[in-house]
Image (cartoon, coloured by chain):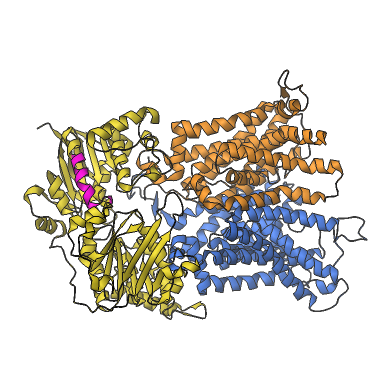
Chain colours: A yellow, B orange, C blue
C-alpha cells in the first residue's frame, strides 16, 4: 500500500530517567482521521513534538511517504507537508485575520484575503479576513488556525484537543469540516481524551499509556468503556456522592453583578446572579473566554467593586464586593485558581512558603513574624493529608507535577475550612488518578456543609460533581438547572441559546430558597 | 520676540534629532518585546566614538558610522545578556547603561573639552533663503532630514511589511510566534541592534553636529528622555517624533529665556525637561486602557524558548 | 553544556558574585594595560593600597557606609520588582534636609541636632522617593523613569541651593554652605580615619533588612509580589503597599547616606556630594544577590573598587572613569554568571534534554 503517509517505528524519547515515549509505533494513511488517545502524561504531546520537529527522538525512525526523515525544527516539518493546529492558539490579538495568516505564508495579507474566503466557504469555516483577532470568539479563532494550517497545503494535520475550546453544539460542525479535509486526501492526527468524540469521528485510534502504545483499535467498533480501560488501565473512577443536608440560607450570593470590560481583550459581565448554599456544589459551564476569568476575579476579590456596589457579592449576610482576597478569606471564602504556577503557587518558592501564601491566618505568624516551624509542620500535614508526591516541604512548587501541585493547592484552601470554596478548572491538565481524588474531596467537602462553586470548561466534570449548574456565555449567566439536565440542552446554552434551558423546570427548592 | 521664536523653532529640529534617533530605535526594540534601558549609555558611547573617529579622520560620515557601530556593539552585549543569559531586562539595561557611560569616558578621555567643525548644512536651494520658514525648516545637516525621513519609514515597516508584522508578533506573543516558525531570538536580536545603532547615531549627532564638542556627561539625560518619549508616543513613530520635537524646543528654552533676561533660576530651566517628562509621563500613564492597546504585550518579559 | 537545575544550589550564592568580581578584575586589568597604564601599578593600587594602612582601610569603610545603606534600601524594592534607580537624588535631598537643620542651627551645641538631622535626612530621601511612589500608584507612571528624572531634578535643586539660599555668605562665592558646627558632625569611628557613623547606620540597616526580608510577613509579601505578581494578587497582597514600602525604604536609606556625607567627610553642603553612590549601590544590591548579608560583602568590594580606582588614577594614570567602567563590567558579568543560579554546567555532552529553538 503506498497510501501510507507517516510511519513511526521504535520512537523512544527520554527526559532524565523518565521515558516519555518508549518504542512507539504509529502508521497514518492518506484520508485517515487517526486518534491518539491517552491521559495527561501518557506521552501524546512528546510524540506530536517528534512528528512536528520540535523534539528529536533518542531512538527510532520517522518515515514520511516511505522515506526516513530527520526534522530539526517545525519549519522543516511544514516544508515536508506536516501542519499543526495548537490547542493554545498561536494567534496575535492586535492583528487582523489575514495578517495572522500571512505570518506563516509567503503571501501578503491582501493577496490572502480571497483565498481565506474561498477555503472558508469550501470547508465550512466562515471568517472575515479583515477582522481583528481580539474581536473573535474562541471558535472563530480556531477556524483561523485551521485555515492558516490548510493554506500551507499540508498532507498531514495534527490537531491538539481541538474540541476543548468548543461548545458541545459546535463540535459536529468541526467534525464535518475535518471529514471534508480528510476527503481531500489529507490525513489528520486527532489528539483527545474524549472517548465519545473519537468514536464519532476517527477511523483508527492509537492508545497510549505510560509512554507506550497499548493498543491500536477501530474506535467505531470499540465501546467507550473499553477505550477507557485501555487508556487508564482500569475503569474510569467516578466520585461517590453521599446525600446532603441543604441549608436554606445561601452562603454565597451574587446579585445583578455588572462589570465593564477592563480592555478590548476582556469580557464584560452582564447582570450576573447566582447563589450557592451550604452543602451543595454549583457548576458554571461554558466555553472558555466567555467571562469565567472576569467572574472568578470578582468573586475572589482580585477585582474589587466600588464600595457602593459591595452588596452585589455577599458572603452569608455580609457584603464583600469591595473587599480584597485577604479579607474575604478571613470571612470564610477560599479560592483555587486555574493557573497553578504563578497564581495559585509561586513557582520558585518552596511548598512551605506556598503554604504560607494564603494560610498565614491559621496561626502561622505572630505579630507580623513568620513562625517557620509551624509553617513547615502545616506544609508537611498538607503533603501527607493530600497524598502530594514531592521531596518534602522544601521542594520548590515548580518541581511538582501538575496533579500533585493541584492536590497541594486544593488541600491548602480546604485547610482554611472555608464556608465557600470556589474552584476554577479543578482538574485541568491533571492525570486521571489525581483528578478523581480532587473531585471526591470536593464532593466530601460539600457533604460536610461547605458551599462549593466549580467553574470548568469540561462539562463532564461539572455533571459529575455539581448539583446544579449555570451556563456562562459572553458575560451572561443562565438561570441554574439541575445537573441531571440533558447534555444537548446544556450544549445549546453554551453556544448562547439559554432558551434551551428554559424548558427545564428549575429546582426551586435550591435555586430560589 | 519673533527672533527668539525663530531661534527656538529652527534649533528645535536639530536639538530634537539625537532624541528622535534614540527614541525611534528604542521603540523598535520595545515593539519586539525588549526593554533596553541602556539608551543613555549607548548614546554616550556613540557620541564619544563618533567624536574620536570624526576628529581623527576628518570625516563626519565615518564619525556617524563609528558612533552607530560602537553603540550597536554595546547593544549586542545587552542582547547577549537578555536573550542568551536570560537576565532581567531592567537590570541588564542598567548594567549596559553604566558600562556605556564608562566606555564613553574612556574613549573620549583624550578629547575632553575639544571642539569639532559642524557638518555642512544642506541648505535647500531657494527654500532656505525664505524668511522665517527658511532657517526653521530648510537649513539643517543631513542627519536632521534623515531623522525626519525615518519616521514614516519605521511607520511603514510596521504597518505594511512582513518584517513589521513579525516584530509585532514577537513583541505580542513570542511563544506563539515561535510556534509558527518565526525566529524570535533572531528578530529580537535584530531589533536590539537596530535600537543600539540608532542610539549611537543620536549620540553622534549630539557630539559631532549639534553641540560639536565632546565632554564627559554630554548626553545629560537625553537617553532617558528618549526612553520616556517611547511611552509618550505610545510606541507609534509619528507621536514619538512629535514628542521629540517638543522636547527639542524645551531644551532650547533654557538658552532663550536667559537671553530674554527673565529672572528664572537657571537650575529650574535645566531641570525643566525632567519635570516636564515626569508630568507628561503621569498624564499619559493615567490612561492605562489606551496604553494597553499599543503597548507590546510581552515587553520586558524574558523568552526562554521551548519550556 | 547547560542543564536546568531542579533545585537551587547554595554554592552558586558565592560562586556567581565571585566569578563576576574575578572577570571584572581581569577585564579591568587588561583594559588599563591596553591603554598603557603600568600593570604592576594598577594591581598594586587595587589589591594592596586599599589595605596598606589604617587610613586606607578607613577610606574603604568610609565608602562602604553609604553604599551599604543605599543598597539595602534599594534591594528591598528590587525584590518586590520596584525599580528605584534614583537613589542618587534621594541621597542629595536627604543631605539637603539635614544641611538645612545644620545651617539653621549653626551655632547650636545641642546633642539633639545630629539625631534631628538624621531624621530629617531619612524623611527627605523618603519623601523624594515618595513622589515616584505617588505617581506610580495614582497614575501608573513607571518608577524607573520618574526616579531617574527626580534624581536629575534633585541635582539642579542642590545647585540652586548652594549657589543661592544656602550659600556661605563669607565663602568667596564658592558653591557651598557654611561649615557645620561640631554638634552637627559625626565623630570618626576609628581615630586616624574618616570612617564614620554612616557605616554603623549601614550595618543597622542590614540587620533590619535581614529581619524584614527573612522573618516578617510583610517581607514575604514583597518577595511574592516580585516573583509572581498574579500570585500576590491572588493571595491579596497589596501592590500599592509594596510600591510604597519599596520606594520609601530605598529613599529613606539613601537620605541617611546623604546625612552621612554632609555630617561626615564633607562637613558642609556642597555641589559635589556623592561620587555616584546612588548609582553604584544599584550594582551593589545586585552583586549581593539582593540578599542583606550578601550586600555587606558587595558593598565592601565596591568600596575597594572606588578607593583602588582613586589610587590608580594617581599612581598608574588610569582615567577617572575607571570606577564607572568597572562598575559596568561588574554588573554585566554578574548578570551573565547568574545563569548558574538556574542552570548548571554539565561536561558530558549526552544529556541534553530538549531540542533547542530554531
In this picture, is B21 found above or below C155? above
Residue C10 visible, this angle: yes
Number of numbered tags placed on the structure image? 0
User: Where does residue A363 sit, x and y in percent of width and height?
Assistant: 43, 81
Residue reaching furthest left? Answer: A221
Looking at the rendering, which quadrant does residue B180 occupy? top left
Residue nearest the observer in this picture, B248 or A449: A449
Q: Which secondary structure dominates the residues rendered in magenta? A: helix
Give, as a single range, the part of the protein colored magenta.
A165-178
A340 or C281: which is nearer to us?
Answer: A340
Task: Please say whether residue A330 is one of the residues in the magenta stretch.
Answer: no
Residue at 44% across, 61% down: C230
- The quarter in which the N terminus of chain B is drawn is top right
* Residue B254: quadrant of the picture: top right
In the image, residue A462 sits, relative to residue B250, either above or below, namely: below
Residue A289 picture location, percent across and down: 34, 53
Amino acid at each position: 500500500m503506498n497510501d501510507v503517509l507517516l510511519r513511526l517505528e521504535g520512537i523512544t524519547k527520554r527526559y532524565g530517567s523518565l521515558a516519555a515515549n518508549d518504542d512507539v509505533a504509529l502508521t497514518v494513511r492518506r484520508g485517515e482521521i487517526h486518534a491518539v488517545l491517552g491521559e495527561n502524561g501518557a506521552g501524546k504531546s512528546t510524540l506530536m513534538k517528534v512528528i512536528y520537529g520540535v523534539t528529536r527522538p533518542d531512538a527510532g525512525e520517522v518515515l514520511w511517504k516511505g522515506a526516513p526523515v530527520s526534522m530539526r525544527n517545525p519549519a522543516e516539518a511544514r516544508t515536508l507537508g506536516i501542519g499543526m493546529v495548537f490547542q493554545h492558539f498561536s494567534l496575535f490579538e492586535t492583528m487582523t485575520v489575514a495578517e495572522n495568516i500571512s505570518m506563516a505564508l509567503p503571501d501578503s495579507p491582501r493577496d490572502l484575503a480571497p483565498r481565506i474566503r474561498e477555503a472558508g466557504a469550501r470547508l465550512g469555516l466562515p471568517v472575515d479576513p479583515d477582522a481583528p483577532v481580539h474581536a473573535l470568539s474562541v471558535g472563530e479563532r480556531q477556524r483561523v488556525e485551521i485555515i492558516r494550517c490548510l493554506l500551507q497545503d499540508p498532507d498531514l494535520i495534527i490537531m491538539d484537543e481541538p474540541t476543548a475550546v468548543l461548545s458541545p453544539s459546535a463540535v459536529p460542525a468541526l467534525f464535518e469540516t475535518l471529514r471534508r479535509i480528510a476527503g481531500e486526501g489529507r490525513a489528520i492526527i486527532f489528539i483527545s481524551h474524549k472517548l465519545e468524540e473519537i468514536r464519532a469521528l476517527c477511523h483508527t485510534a492509537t492508545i497510549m499509556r505510560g509512554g507506550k502504545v497499548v493498543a491500536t483499535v477501530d474506535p467505531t467498533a470499540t465501546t467507550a468503556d473499553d477505550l477507557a480501560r485501555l487508556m487508564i488501565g482500569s475503569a474510569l473512577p467516578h466520585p461517590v456522592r453521599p446525600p446532603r443536608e441543604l441549608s436554606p440560607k445561601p452562603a454565597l450570593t451574587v446579585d445583578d453583578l455588572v462589570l465593564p470590560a477592563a480592555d478590548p481583550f476582556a469580557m464584560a459581565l452582564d447582570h450576573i446572579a447566582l447563589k450557592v448554599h451550604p452543602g451543595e456544589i454549583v457548576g458554571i459551564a461554558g466555553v472558555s473566554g466567555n467571562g469565567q476569568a472576569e467572574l472568578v476575579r470578582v468573586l475572589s476579590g482580585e477585582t474589587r467593586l466600588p464600595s457602593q456596589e459591595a452588596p452585589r457579592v455577599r458572603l452569608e449576610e455580609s457584603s464583600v464586593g469591595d473587599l480584597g482576597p485577604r479579607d474575604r478569606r478571613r470571612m470564610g471564602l477560599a479560592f483555587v485558581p486555574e493557573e497553578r504556577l504563578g497564581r495559585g503557587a509561586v513557582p520558585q518558592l518552596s511548598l512551605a512558603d506556598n503554604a504560607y501564601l494564603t494560610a498565614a491566618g491559621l496561626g502561622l505568624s505572630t505579630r507580623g513574624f513568620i513562625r517557620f516551624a509551624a509553617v513547615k509542620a502545616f506544609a508537611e500535614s498538607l503533603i501527607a493529608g493530600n497524598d502530594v508526591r514531592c521531596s518534602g516541604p522544601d521542594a520548590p512548587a515548580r518541581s511538582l507535577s501538575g496533579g500533585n501541585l493541584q492536590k497541594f493547592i486544593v488541600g491548602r484552601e480546604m485547610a482554611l475550612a472555608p464556608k465557600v470554596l470556589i474552584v476554577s478548572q479543578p482538574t485541568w491538565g491533571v492525570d486521571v488518578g489525581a483528578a478523581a481524588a480532587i473531585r471526591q474531596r470536593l464532593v466530601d467537602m460539600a457533604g460536610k456543609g461547605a458551599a462549593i462553586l466549580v467553574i470548568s470548561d469540561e462539562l463532564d466534570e461539572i455533571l459529575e460533581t455539581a448539583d446544579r449548574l449555570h451556563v456562562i456565555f459572553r458575560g451572561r449567566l443562565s438561570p441554574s438547572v439541575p445537573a441531571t439536565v440533558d447534555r444537548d440542552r446544556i450544549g445549546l446554552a453554551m453556544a448562547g441559546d439559554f432558551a434551551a434551558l428554559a424548558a427545564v423546570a428549575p429546582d426551586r427548592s435550591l435555586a430560589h430558597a | 520676540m519673533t527672533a527668539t521664536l525663530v531661534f527656538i523653532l529652527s534649533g528645535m529640529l536639530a536639538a530634537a534629532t539625537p532624541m528622535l534617533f534614540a527614541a525611534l530605535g528604542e521603540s523598535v526594540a520595545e515593539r519586539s518585546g525588549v526593554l533596553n534601558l541602556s539608551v543613555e549609555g549607548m548614546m554616550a558611547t556613540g557620541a564619544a566614538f563618533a567624536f574620536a573617529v570624526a576628529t581623527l579622520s576628518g570625516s563626519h560620515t565615518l564619525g556617524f558610522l563609528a558612533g552607530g557601530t560602537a553603540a550597536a556593539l554595546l547593544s549586542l552585549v545587552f542582547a547577549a545578556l537578555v536573550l542568551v543569559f536570560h537576565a532581567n531586562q531592567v537590570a541588564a539595561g542598567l548594567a549596559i547603561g553604566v558600562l556605556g557611560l564608562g566606555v564613553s569616558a574612556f574613549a573620549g578621555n583624550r578629547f575632553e573639552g575639544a571642539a569639532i567643525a559642524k557638518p555642512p548644512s544642506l541648505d535647500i536651494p531657494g527654500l532656505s533663503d525664505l524668511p522665517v520658514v527658511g532657517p526653521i525648516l530648510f537649513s539643517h545637516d543631513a542627519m536632521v532630514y534623515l531623522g525626519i525621513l525615518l519616521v514614516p519609514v519605521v511607520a511603514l515597516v510596521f504597518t505594511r511589511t512582513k518584517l513589521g508584522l513579525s516584530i509585532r508578533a514577537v513583541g505580542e506573543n513570542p511563544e506563539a510566534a515561535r510556534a509558527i516558525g518565526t525566529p524570535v531570538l533572531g528578530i529580537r536580536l535584530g531589533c536590539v541592534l537596530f535600537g543600539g545603532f540608532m542610539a549611537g547615531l543620536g549620540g553622534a549627532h549630539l557630539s559631532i553636529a549639534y553641540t560639536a564638542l565632546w565632554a564627559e556627561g554630554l548626553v545629560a539625560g537625553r537617553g532617558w528622555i528618549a526612553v520616556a518619549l517611547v511611552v509618550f508616543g505610545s510606541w507609534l513613530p509619528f507621536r514619538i517624533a512629535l514628542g521629540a520635537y517638543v522636547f527639542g524646543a524645551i531644551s532650547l528654552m533654557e538658552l532663550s529665556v536667559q537671553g530674554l533676561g527673565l529672572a528664572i533660576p537657571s537650575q529650574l530651566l535645566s531641570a525643566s525637561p525632567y519635570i516636564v517628562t515626569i508630568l507628561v509621563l503621569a498624564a499619559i500613564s493615567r490612561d492605562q486602557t489606551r496604553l494597553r492597546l499599543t503597548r507590546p504585550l510581552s515587553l520586558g518579559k524574558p523568552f526562554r524558548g521551548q519550556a | 553544556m547547560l542543564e536546568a537545575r531542579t533545585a537551587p544550589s547554595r554554592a552558586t550564592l558565592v560562586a556567581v558574585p565571585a566569578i563576576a568580581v574575578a572577570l571584572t578584575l581581569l577585564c579591568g586589568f587588561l583594559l588599563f594595560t591596553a591603554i598603557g597604564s603600568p600593570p604592576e601599578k594598577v594591581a598594586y593600587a587595587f589589591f594592596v593600597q586599599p589595605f596598606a594602612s589604617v587610613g586606607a582601610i578607613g577610606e574603604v569603610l568610609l565608602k562602604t557606609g553609604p553604599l551599604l545603606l543605599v543598597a539595602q534600601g534599594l534591594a528591598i524594592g528590587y525584590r518586590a520588582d520596584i525599580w528605584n534607580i534614583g537613589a542618587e537624588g534621594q541621597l542629595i535631598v536627604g543631605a539637603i534636609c539635614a544641611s538645612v537643620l545644620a545651617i539653621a542651627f549653626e551655632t547650636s551645641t545641642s546633642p539633639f541636632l545630629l539625631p534631628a538631622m538624621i531624621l530629617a535626612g531619612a524623611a527627605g530621601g523618603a519623601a523624594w522617593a515618595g513622589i515616584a511612589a505617588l505617581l506610580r500608584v495614582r497614575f501608573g507612571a513607571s518608577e524607573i523613569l520618574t526616579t531617574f528624572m527626580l534624581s536629575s531634578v534633585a541635582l539642579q535643586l542642590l545647585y540652586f541651593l548652594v549657589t543661592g539660599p544656602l550659600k556661605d555668605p563669607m565663602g568667596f562665592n564658592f558653591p557651598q554652605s557654611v561649615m557645620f558646627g561640631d554638634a552637627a558632625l559625626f565623630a570618626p569611628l576609628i581615630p586616624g580615619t574618616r570612617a564614620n557613623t554612616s557605616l554603623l547606620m549601614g550595618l543597622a540597616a542590614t540587620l533590619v533588612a535581614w529581619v524584614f526580608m527573612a522573618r516578617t510577613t510583610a517581607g514575604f509579601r514583597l518577595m511574592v509580589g516580585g516573583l509572581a505578581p498574579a500570585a500576590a494578587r491572588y493571595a491579596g497582597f497589596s501592590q500599592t503597599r509594596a510600591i510604597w514600602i519599596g520606594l520609601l525604604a530605598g529613599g529613606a536609606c539613601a537620605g541617611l547616606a546623604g546625612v552621612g556625607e554632609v555630617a561626615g567627610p564633607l562637613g558642609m553642603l556642597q555641589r559635589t556630594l556623592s561620587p555616584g553612590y546612588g548609582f553604584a549601590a544599584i550594582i551593589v544590591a545586585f552583586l549581593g544577590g539582593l540578599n542583606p548579608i550578601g550586600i555587606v560583602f558587595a558593598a565592601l568590594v565596591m568600596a575597594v573598587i572606588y578607593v583602588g580606582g582613586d589610587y590608580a588614577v594617581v599612581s598608574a594614570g588610569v582615567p577617572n572613569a575607571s570606577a564607572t567602567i568597572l562598575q559596568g563590567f561588574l554588573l554585566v558579568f554578574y548578570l551573565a554568571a547568574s545563569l548558574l543560579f538556574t542552570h548548571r554546567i554539565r561536561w558530558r555532552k549526552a544529556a541534553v534534554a530538549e531540542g533547542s529553538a530554531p
